[in-house]
Image (cartoon, helix red, strand yellow):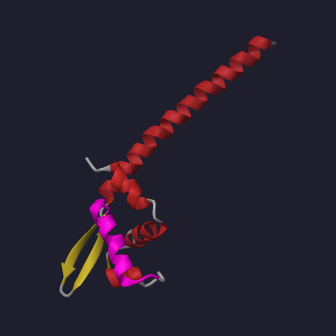
Amino acid sequence: MMNLDHTFAALADPTRRAILARLALGEATAGELASPFAISQPAISRHLKVLEDASLIARIRDGQHMRCRLLPEALKSANDWLAFYSRFWSESFDRLDEHLKQEGSDDE
């Protein structure tokens, strides 16, 4: 099972989310991923390390370059966790709504 703590910690940073959004379009080198950001190459490397440690990306050697690839499994685990709680809260609010409607009709 994927570690959701690492996944959500990695997703907490907007730069890392932007990197994942770029990788959703296809593989890219670290340099390609760094180009839209006004941060240093070492800072991008640290972001990539966090994403890799969270199993959100894989880095693959391609000659002299390292290509990064999105790994959707950790995102699927996070989505499944969120979907469960979304259903829970939706059902809870539906029950509350029914209860309040019932209480309101009892007062009349």
7 to the left or right of 92: left
- Please tell me in which quadrant of the rendered image residue 42 appears: bottom left
Q: Position of residue 10 (x, y in %)?
A: 39, 61
Describe residue 97's horizontal placement relative to residue 37 as left or right: right
Task: Specify the quadrant of the image occupied by residue 28.
Answer: bottom left
Where in the figure is residue 32, as x and y percent of width and height? Answer: 37, 83
Q: Is residue 104 shown above or below 68?
A: above
Residue 7 included in the magenta stretch of the image: no
Q: Is 81 above or below relative to 88?
A: below
Residue in front for this viewpoint, 29 or 45 = 45
Tell me which residue sits at (27%, 62%) in the image: 53
Q: Quadrant of the C terminus?
A: top right
Range of the magenta residues?
39-56
Instruction: Report whether residue 70 is seen.
Output: no
On screen, residue 88 above or below 82: above
What residue lies at 40% left-to-right and 57% top-to-bottom?
9
Query: Left or right of 103: which side holds 44?
Result: left
Residue nearest the observer in this picture, 46 or 91? 46
* Residue 54 coordinates in the image, percent (x, y): 30, 59
